[in-house]
Image (spheres, rainbow, N blue to C red):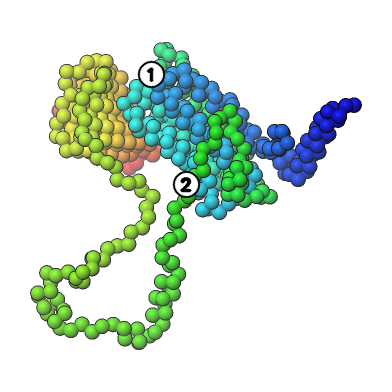
Amino acid sequence: MSLPDLEKLVERLEQVAFRLERAEVCPATAKAGGRVLMRGTSVELISASVQAYDAILSGVLQNYIALSKKIGAEVASHADMVARAFQVQRQFLTIAAKSREPDKHALRELLKPTSDQIQAVQDFREKNRTSKLFNHLSAVSESIPALGWVTISPAPAPFVKEMNDACQFYSNRVLMDYKDKDKTHIDWARSWLSVLVELQGFVKAHHLTGLVWNPSGGDAMTLVKSGGAAPTVGGGPPPPPPPPPADFTASAPVEDARAALFKDINKGEDISKGLKKVSADQMTHKNPALRGQPSLPGKASPTAPQFASNRPSQEVVKPPRFELEGKKWCVDYQVNQPQLVVDNTQMNQSVNIYKCVNTVVIVKGKVNSICVDSCKKTSVVFDDIVSVVEFINCQSVKAQSMGKVPTVAIDKTDGAHVYLSNKSLDAEIVTSKSSEVNVSVPKADGDFLEIPVPEQYKSKWNGKTLSTIVVDQA
């Protein structure tokens, strides 16, 4: 045997020995069904959990991305952001498989990249509300928080199911809009639902009671700083490290103030020795000239302490908008408008009313549909509707039909009153996650009969399925 052949043989033997030694050092990974990958002279351990997650990335997620690329436009860009979110979570799961559970501060820092990607997906939907593919963007944005299952315990799988249910409204609209028109959009909606179903199955199989860490692993933050996270499957380079977290411990120590308070209380009668005597000329009830002056000149008036809040900052007020854009009438950001009239309409046009407050919109003529989104104390009066009038995320809204309307859909709305005309008595009222919904129907004397939509139900197992009935509220 020549010298080069001997060197190759020795190198191969060294690699085999190194692999066996590493597998012996990490028996937990081998027992859990993990695999060991050789990359030159380095070894990468991949747990069974990460392997199952890789199957989602290379399976149903790739199918969703491919169909999104086929549709194109905003849906394709949205799919790229979703793919990045899944890849970032894959890196997090790799760290969890190699590390023991960190403290809350470190965990918040590890989860920040995933949180940022979820927020980016939802912000993209908000920036493209006028898109013709808005239902596609909404179906994904409403359910992408499913990636937050890593923070849920002891039952994260039902949380993923809830996110799946949250997108059903918009995914069903995609299925209805493109039924018998474009099968690509039908397959796209089903592919995204398949991603959520597979994610739920993955969580149930590998993280049933919560995210599983490696008790015998190392420090998670040390692993991140050393670049120990496995590279993503089929993706680009990993995202940059998150910025340093804000210092939440910089506030004044509570224990010291409390100890000082009890120390003063324990002085007994001596506690009042430090008080200053107020003379008669300093008393406002004896000296009226002091009443118009601030109590402490030169000092700001005491205010209530400001606490950190998780509420988002106040929204920027945008200018009102009332215009025809293509085949869509846009009535946005209208405030205190007693009568906005949409006339010269056509049957193939739709009306979109968005974030209006204390406003009345009158739609004359026959239009395809009306959508009232995120409005408060807003009323809409319309003649004839081809398909549907819908309310989404609204509060205290009213709708009055002067002609015929097939369907009124109410979703995530608190307080809705629908007035039907004689021509629209056969209309379907579809409600979901809504409260205080009432329907008024005309009587023979010209008055209206108000009927509340049931909110309470009773379900019972009948041997085959759940039988649900409305509970009468006396």
On the question of residue 63 being in view, the answer is yes
**Residue visible at 44% across and 53% down in the picture:** 246
Q: As drawn, which residue projects farthest toward the top?
A: 180
The foreground one among 365 and 265 is 265
Quadrant that contains the C terminus: top left
Q: As drawn, which residue projects farthest toward the left?
A: 289
**Residue visible at 42% across and 15% down in the picture:** 179
Q: Assess disc 2: are there few (<14), some (14-19) or many (≥20) residues with their C-alpha within 10 Å of its C-alpha.
A: few
On the question of residue 200 being in view, the answer is no
Count of all numbered marks drawn on residues in the image:
2
| Residue 37 coordinates in the image, percent (x, y) | 70, 34
- Residue 16 circle label: none
Amino acid type at circle 2 is Pro
Q: CB under 8 Å between callouts 1 and 2?
A: no
Disc 2, SS: loop
Q: Is residue 79 left or right of residue 348?
A: right
| Residue 288 coordinates in the image, percent (x, y) | 9, 75
**Residue visible at 58% across and 25% down in the picture:** 59
- Residue 243 circle label: 2
| Residue 61 coordinates in the image, percent (x, y) | 54, 27
Amino acid type at circle 1 is Asp
Q: Quadrant of residue 207?
A: top right
Disc 1, SS: helix
- Residue 177 circle label: 1
Of marks 1 and 2, the one in the foreground: 2
Q: As drawn, which residue projects farthest toward the front?
A: 3
Quadrant that contains the N terminus: top right
| Residue 264 coordinates in the image, percent (x, y) | 39, 80
Q: Quadrant of residue 262?
A: bottom left
